[in-house]
Image (cartoon, rainbow, N blue to C red):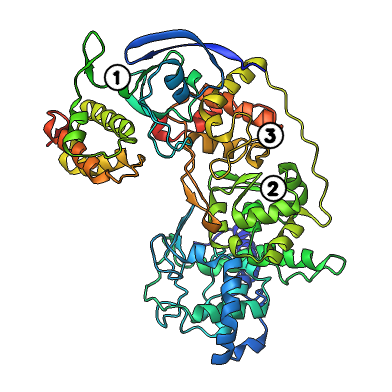
Amino acid sequence: MVLPRRWRIVLLAAGLCVVIAGIPALVVFLGAFEHSVVDAAVEAPLTAKQIANLAPKGRYIAAAADCVACHTTEGGAPWAGGRPFEMPIGTLYATNITPDPETGIGGWTRAEFQRAVRDGVAKGGRHLYPAMPYVSYRQMTEEDVDAVYAYLLTRQPVRQENRRDSLPFPYVRQFMTFWNLLNLPHDVPSPVAQKSAAWNRGRYLVDALGHCGECHTPRDITMGVIPSRYLQGAVIEGVDAPDITPEGLARLGFAPNRLGDFMRSGMGPQGVMAFAMYDVVQHSTQYLTDEDAAAMATYLAGDPPPPLPAFAAADLPAGTKDNGHRLYVAVCGGCHGLAGEGTPNVAPPMTTNAALRLPQPTNLLTVLITGLPWRDFPHGARLQDMPGFTGLLTDQEIADVANYLRATWGGRVPDVTPATVRGMRPASDK
Amino acid sequence: MSLAKRPLSLTVNDRAIGPIEVPETLMMLDFLHEHLNLTGSRVGCGQGICHACTVMLAEPDGSWREIRTCITGAQFFAGKRVRTIEGHAERDGQGNVVALTPIQQAFIEHFAFQCGYCTPGFVTAAAVLLERLKRRPIRRSEVEGIIETALAPHICRCTGYVRYYEAVRAVILATPGLVVG
């Protein structure tokens, strides 16, 4: 069969299009656009003495970078990996980074480790998924990554095979070259000369080590962070990671000195670290030195910080106010204080609580409905559980108390409806 | 300054109470002690950890739950039905105790308590558990686990935990209809 001439031309053109589009795609796929920020000098291995000298620093850097939170599974050996990360298309598992030669990183060279952390490319050229925050760690200094490498090599080796991810097909990893082209900055930013040393150190702690933006900066459809909305807050694991820009923090009532304390102790006038931030305090920020905690706060809260806005309670319809106040006294005030002043070492104050000042009621409602577990905090502190009220209060009652709290001490428009509450109740309780 | 008051009516140990004018900010434990002279519910930690202050609160469906009275306002109980430690044992017309409940008897027989301060809370927890098992029996293999869960929030500084636990288990196993299979 001979196709009409017209069809042959159409097919030929289509074929050309595929080739023209395909060649660049293939080039990207093979990683030709990938740019390493790792210097060739790291091909030289560290000596045993260098490793011994760097390891103590590595312990601190690894804490500041919160490596252990992901690379240890619940009840598992430290650094041996296995923690699952549920993704829309499958489950990833954190890897074993103990120095076991076969299942860990004992066989990795210094350069391989550097490229994994800062380029997102593991030993053997295997691309990492950005669940490993190499986009942030890319900004780490060579020396700090060496220090972490030295620290990990001096840990107890644990023989534990890495679990294979459950993604539907195995070639996804190489497609990370496209993702990296879109989302992995080519180079790392330099210190800003006009800013103070504390601000620059703080930026390094926030952006490179703490990788705060991985949760606090919203992501676009490619799952890359949106640079123009840097640290402006995002939804993560069903709750709001707040806006932690200087303006955002000022709206929540954080002055820099308070913020530094909050990062280290996990509690303060602005409330108690909850959800994923509890783990961050527990594994990471509690270990920051005075100077580093202050530097982090200087960078986040601004240098100079914007003035804290004057607080004004929002108007509340009389009925809601009366109901809300009654409910507050009935089930909140016993611990949080009848005037919202809190009880030291028992329950945080409401009057200055950041969770009440968030634009959305999500975090407050989550706590009201499901409660929070008891927790250990740094320096021997411990807080009892906050009970959830899902079985005790109706949708209307939870909405009333939420509106009362948000309007009275959050200055937020009382817009929580019983339907909002209902939508957030656990399925077993609807 | 005088405290704002509000009338309160509720049912305590099957007796209708009120309306009584009580301060809006009064906690239930203080109401029981000061207004009703029901002093069996204990003040322990005052912050909801020790559970010595718990009483039974009736749900709309007639089932019961435990509730801490030291951190729950009296006005929360308006129109509700509660049972305090004074409302468990059987009494005669003059209010004298004529028979303890099986769980109270079992705590005595097992020497479960020493100073007795936490006992009202443990009786409450065990009674709520037994009421629940009457409505929804469990399998034999679940008994130990469910006792642990039910008693776990209660603190006993004389450490009578094992004896409390054994007493509750004995009552559950000896009471027909709580365990199936």
Q: How far across and how far down the image is residue A268, in percent? A: 64, 47
Give the crowd class for mark 3: few <14, some 14-19, many >=20 residues within 10 Å.
Answer: many
Disc 3, SS: helix
Which kind of residue does numbered mark 1 sit on? Answer: Gly
Q: What residue is at 51 percent from the left and 66 percent from the top?
A: A68
Q: Nearer the viewer, residue A153 or A137?
A: A153
Q: Nearer the viewer, residue B171 or A2?
A: B171
The mark closer to the camera, 2 or 1, is: 1
Answer with mark 3 or mark 2, whichever residue precedes in sequence: 2
Task: Say the numbered circle drawn on residue B53.
Answer: none
Q: Is residue A211 above or below residue A418?
A: below
Answer yes or no: is residue A113 visible.
Answer: no
Task: Say the numbered circle drawn on residue B87.
Answer: 1
Cα gap from disc 3 to disc 2, whole angstroms? 15 Å
Residue of label 3: A410
Residue of label 2: A243
Horizontally, residue A52 falls left or right of residue B113, namely right
Give the crowd class for mark 1: few <14, some 14-19, many >=20 residues within 10 Å.
Answer: some
In the picture as drawn, the residue positioned furthest to the right comes out as: A194
